[in-house]
Amino acid sequence: MPQERKLLDRVRDAVRLKNYSYRTEKAYVHWIKRYILYHQKRHPAEMGAREIEVFLTHLAIEGHVAASTQNQALSALLFLYKEVLRQPIEYVDVTWAKKPVRLPVVLTREEVDAVIRQLSGVPLLVTQLLYGSGLRLTECLRLRVQDVDFGQKMLLVRDGKGQKDRTTTLPQTVVPDLQTHLQRVKKQHHDDLQKGYGRAPLPHALARKYPHAETEWVWQFVFPSTKLSRNPRGDDDRLYRYHLHESTIQRTVRRAAQAAGVNKRVTPHTFRHSFATHLLEAGYDIRTIQELLGHKDVKTTMIYTHVAQRGALGVRSPLDW
């Protein structure tokens, strides 16, 4: 009789069946482990809403975690009980961490130009797309060759936040350099194939449906890693060409902002904020910006009205009259 799989392996199976990202898989496994250890390694099937409430309150009061972190832990535990243990939790009464209301850091157009002038190569292309298309960093680095539509001047963002696809604009300024970059990537892919590699990891469901697609050019990453590595979700020793790691761009952007003399906390996400704010200042309607950003609720997009130099808070100081 086959032995039942361990709980965390069952969690991984359920996450992959839902086609969630590897990042989500790691986060869910992490929080479920923390939950079990906090309750002295009791099996979750023997626990329920009360133990979840105690654990999440502990994170908020003693762990001083952010509200978003507490929400992530709750999502992991609700997933465990609903999808793995088949014991859905209907209601959880928790002392929540206070979620701070912060306005996004936004650069002026001059500051954007100043930072971009400090960049070159792949970090330059990535940053131009973050600002020119309003992408999140992970969305940009996960772009596949087939997601770039030069003819229709748009990018297809697959499995964005909330597992939704959307399209956004492809800035024409970046097209010549992006095409040259893709030529170099294609040559690298050809060389990889000659050496018996040339595989890009596919989402779990697609890998099963199209077992040979991982070596096709259209499925390769636009911004591939410089190194080959093994699939952390796989059980084989094959090497894959993943996308560039987020930390590479994060470090480079931070240094570029310092070199440009921009006295703000600049991250790659700052360019997405700046994209939305500058479109709003240019007169584009909030619904269009919501679609480009992939926000589920327009209220999320409305925060940019508070930092735009027009609209409700675009008030001229009486000192300037």
Image (cartoon, rainbow, N blue to C red):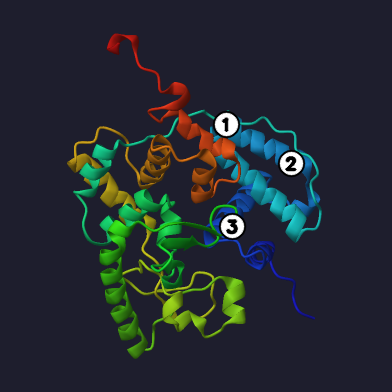
Check disc 3 and report the residue beneath it. Answer: 164
Q: Nearer the viewer, residue 170 or 195?
A: 170
Q: Residue at x 48, y 62 (%)?
A: 156
Picture mark count: 3
Residue 195 can be seen in this image: no
Specify the amino acid type for callout 2.
Answer: Glu
Q: Residue at x 26, y 71 (%)?
A: 180
Q: Residue at x 64, y 31 (%)?
A: 96
The mark that comes first in sequence, 3 or 2, is 2
Foreground: disc 3 or disc 2: 3
- Residue 101 % position (x, y): 51, 28
Q: Disc 3 vs disc 1: Cβ atoms closer than 8 Å?
A: no
Q: Disc 3 vs disc 2: Cβ atoms closer than 8 Å?
A: no
The mark that comes first in sequence, 3 or 1, is 1
Residue 311 is left or right of residue 291, and the answer is left
Check disc 1 and report the residue beneath it. Answer: 62
* Quarter that holds the C terminus: top left
Check disc 2 and report the residue beneath it. Answer: 51
Mark 2–mark 1 Cα distance, whole angstroms, equals 16 Å
- Residue 232 % position (x, y): 50, 69
Against 282, residue 149 (above or below) is below
Against 156, residue 218 (above or below) is below
SS of the residue at dot 3? loop
Mark 3 crowdedness (10 Å alpha carbons): few <14, some 14-19, many ≥20: few
Mark 3–mark 2 Cα distance, whole angstroms, equals 33 Å
Mark 3–mark 1 Cα distance, whole angstroms, equals 35 Å
Residue 117 is left or right of residue 265, and the answer is left
Residue 261 can be seen in this image: yes
